[in-house]
Image: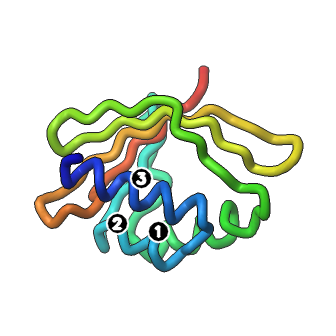
Amino acid sequence: MTAAERIVQAQLDAYNARNLEAFAACYAEDVKVYRLPAMTLSLSGRAALADHYASKRFNLPKLHAALLHRIVQGSRVIDHEDVTLDSENHMRAVAIYDVNADSLIAAVWFVDAE
């Protein structure tokens, strides 16, 4: 497993455990999160990321992301996931992670469904 894949897996494991501290620690202080295809910047910085996940995801008791497929290309990792939000809401998610030289996630692009 590459360093890039290890940190992306660590954040997925922390996400599924709803462990905010471990999850946020996988990201660079100046992480940027974008929405594709519009390239909209949706979050900037580790603190904003932690606040978002604390209030929008980790408060959901049934939260779980099942990895369907992963592609590793150098410092980039692309995950396709089936995400359970609660008893009634599921979604498919595609995330592209860019891992920096410090082996932290520096940028994420979430691909919106059409």
Extreme top residue here? 114
24 shown above or below 97: below
Number of numbered discs on residues = 3
53 displayed left or right of 98 = right
Q: Quadrant of residue 17?
A: bottom right
59 shown above or below 43: below
What's the CA distance linking mark 2 and mark 1? 8 Å
Label 1 packing within 10 angstroms: few (<14), some (14-19), many (20+) = many
Residue at image mark 3: 33
31 shown above or below 113: below
Extreme front residue here? 1
Who's the residue at 49% across and 32% down the image?
80
Residue flagged by tag 2: what amino acid is it? Tyr
Who's the residue at 29% across and 55% down the image?
6
Label 2 packing within 10 angstroms: few (<14), some (14-19), many (20+) = many
Image disc number at residue 23:
1
Who's the residue at 24% across and 41% down the image?
76
Q: Evaluate whether residue 58 shows in this view.
A: yes
Q: Quadrant of residue 30?
A: bottom left
Q: Position of residue 11 (x, y in %)?
A: 43, 60
Q: Earlier in the sequence, mark 3 or mark 1?
A: 1
Tag 2, which secondary structure?
strand
Q: Quadrant of residue 52?
A: bottom right
